[in-house]
Amino acid sequence: MFKKCKVVMLPARKATTIAKSMTSGKLFYHKTLELAKRHNEWEGGTFMNLYVLSDDKIEANDWCMCDDRNHISENPKYRLGKCIKIVNGWIYTMDGMGENPDWTKKIIATTDLNLTVLSDKSNFEVPLPMPSDLFIKKYCELKGIDQVLVEYENKGKCVKCKREKEGHVCECGEDSNYEYQILPKLASDNTITIRKVKDSYTKEEVIKLLETYSDFVDDLYRPHTSNNILAWESKDEWIEKNL
């Protein structure tokens, strides 16, 4: 399944592989930091980072971005932070700020290597997932992309140690005691899968989306209920009546 997410670009504190020209406003992307530094010295510009934001639930240790804009002028004013606790729905970050949940989104991927989280597998801090090279290139070519579709999947984690499900018995010794979450699907290189947002669909495409979602709901909820009204039985009837 895919979820609609927002993409934000902000100036970077350190050199990155993305730069914005001070004169033309054009965006440049290089695969290596050394090439980016050389180009930026010649072109003259500002290093930038990309952040992919979602409406996913924010919990402790998640990185988030608050759009603390002036709601009169509506000029965006973004602020980054790592959540340390949730109090009465408000999101408190390491700098002590309490962020309004209505204006705060979870960062699910970024080119900012300073944003790290504790790995479930190694117990070391690792960078957040990244957008793919292909997406970054396309973003720079188009001088920005506001919204994208990010692929998600249903993943199980051990209730005790939070490691990803890899069998019936976890390494910590827990027997099949897993909790399931809908998380961004990651490739082997720790990148997310991104598609462009469509604004129109054919009837065949809508039916395909409904079948995919019906499969997903069926797998997720059928073991827990005998009256799954969103599964295959109702899907065909809904298509017949509405399409």
Image (spheres, grey):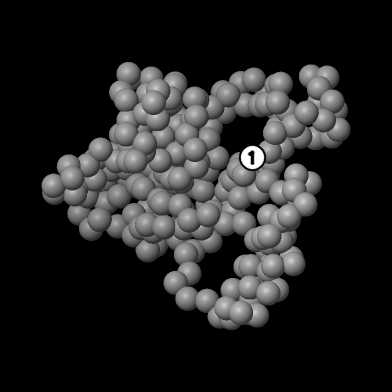
Picture coordinates of residue 65, whole percent (x, y): 37, 37
Front position in the image: 92 or 122: 92
Q: Does 8 sit above or below residue 209? A: above
Picture coordinates of residue 169, whole percent (x, y): 85, 28
Quadrant of the rendered structure where residue 210 is?
A: bottom right
Q: In which quarter of the image is the N terminus?
A: bottom right
Q: Is residue 162 left or right of residue 37?
A: right
Which residue appears at 48% of the width and 69% of the height? 198
Q: Name the residue under label 1.
A: 181
Picture coordinates of residue 103, whole percent (x, y): 32, 41
Quadrant of the rendered structure where residue 79 is?
A: top left
Front position in the image: 55 or 9: 55
- Looking at this rendering, what residue extends furthest in the front direction? 227
Q: Is residue 52 visible?
A: yes
Q: Does 217 sit above or below residue 201? A: above
Q: In this view, does 131 lie to the left or right of 239?
A: left
Give the residue type at disc 1. Gln
Which residue appears at 57% of the width and 28% of the height? 126
Q: Is residue 206 left or right of residue 88?
A: right
Q: In which quarter of the image is the C terminus?
A: bottom right
Which residue appears at 81% of the width and 22% of the height? 174
- Kindly state the secondary structure of the residue where label 1 is placed: strand
Which residue appears at 50% of the width and 29% of the height? 59
Q: Does 206 sit above or below residue 3? A: below
Picture coordinates of residue 213, whole percent (x, y): 65, 61
